[in-house]
Image (cartoon, grey):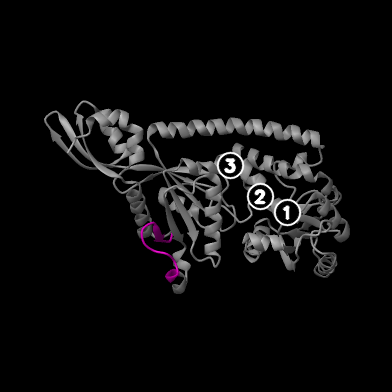
Amino acid sequence: MAITTHDTETEIQDRAILVSLVTDKIKRTGVDPELSLQELVQLAETAGVVVLDVLRQNKETPDSKWFIGKGKVEELRMAADGLGANTAIFDQELSGAQVRNLEEALDLKIIDRTQLILDIFAGRAKTREGIIQVELAQLSYLLPRLSGHGKNLSRLGGGIGTRGPGESKLETDRRHIRDRISELKRQLDEVVKTRELHRERRRKSGAVQVALVGYTNAGKSTLLKQLTDADVYIENQLFATLDPTSRVLQLPAGKEVVLTDTVGFIQNLPHDLVASFRATLEEVNEANLVLHVVDASSPMREEQMEVVQSILQDLGAAGKPQIVLFNKSDICRPEQLQMLPSGPGFLKISAFNPDDLTRITEMIADELAGDTLTFRIPGDRGDLSSLLYRVGEVLEQNVEDNDVLYQVRLNKEDYGKWSYKLAEYVEQE
């Protein structure tokens, strides 16, 4: 990624040293600092940054002035001079005062993890909803830190941390930013209402919804494309997909469900981003079934699964029926495959294996299936016959006099939705 300065035509590329501070508080929370640091490398590379070196420090508490210790600041300055770095990226969130102090001491652009993730999201947002959500998160992050970014912006005027929908607002005063935040929230409320109308339509139509969730880059979009022939952007990078995509998936017995891909999760996902994207993430709450896609080849597989479960818990979707799909089994070592759980609710798959795709649809059908009921439908009630095919799995159909007897496997939730139409036609054993 190239950055053009205000005063010259030369292009400056971000060449960064990454900095991680491990405090006693981080150790107590159980967050894996090495996993977080590895992700920071991937995030930086996704943003087009050349990563030159990594500095680590263990400290009881962050330094209120420098975040890291004063000696480590000097070590960082010497490393930057020696390697030709122009940027320092911190794995934790910095205050505006810390950014300002570090800039003055190091003469580097200072970026923290939150700013880096927001920048990546800014580059990924394509829909109106996505653009509003990212700008809202950027401005919510920026507002309390305005005093810490003046030199940063005037010196480089672009690049990571300054790109995207919010860029034109970065030099306005707090009042204008607050006004803009209020306007964005109003626009987002309108989008949320529209999304809720779509959800209500799906509920009324009896559509069964299945949500794909998982750590970023686990292969959710690839799986959506392979299962439904969806035209979605796929790339081996973090947050390749930002805007949720829904497509119809046909199950083996002919029943159709709506399969929705959601934004990927990551450890320490910025609070402002979670808040702004809550309406999108809450698509998971509408799902009848959750497909948790896991990168089985990742050495941090278990930690990534815990992060996903934690975010589902925060969204109130932890109790949803769930199938865990251990994806990328084709690139796993034999010992990795042996360590994976197996049995009901678990599948080892490759998104590119047609047989595995069939197994997925069969497991979805089994998970969604419920009790088997027999319905006696009058021959002239074609509307009820089509409803049975839409919301259940018709196992058998026989004509008897002027009626049609349907043997249907129907889950309790679906039957509950449509019992007001169907209950009087159930044949009692």
Do the numbered discs 1 and 2 sit on residues whose CB atoms are within 8 Å?
yes
Do the numbered discs 3 and 1 sit on residues whose CB atoms are within 8 Å?
no
| Location of mark 1 (residue) | 93
Mark 3 residue element: helix
Circle 1 crowding by C-alpha within 10 Å: few under 14, some 14–19, many from 20: some
Which of the image's four quarters has the N terminus?
bottom right
Does 125 sit left or right of 58 as displayed? Answer: left
Task: Give residue 257's position: percent from left, percent from top.
Answer: 38, 42
Asked if one can make out residue 235 in the rendered structure from this viewpoint, the answer is no
Q: Residue furthest top?
A: 380
The residue under the point 53% across, 65% down is 298
Task: Give residue 365's position: percent from left, percent from top.
Answer: 33, 49
Give, as a three-letter code, the residue at label 1.
Answer: Glu
Task: Give residue 161's position: percent from left, percent from top.
Answer: 74, 50
Question: Which range is magenta?
Answer: 337-351
In primary-sequence order, the first of circles 3 and 1 is 1
| Location of mark 2 (residue) | 270
In primary-sequence order, the first of circles 3 and 2 is 2
Circle 2 crowding by C-alpha within 10 Å: few under 14, some 14–19, many from 20: some
Give, as a three-letter code, the residue at label 3.
Answer: Arg
| Location of mark 3 (residue) | 278
In primary-sequence order, the first of circles 1 and 2 is 1
Mark 3 to mark 2 CA distance (whole Å)? 12 Å
Mark 1 to mark 2 CA distance (whole Å)? 9 Å
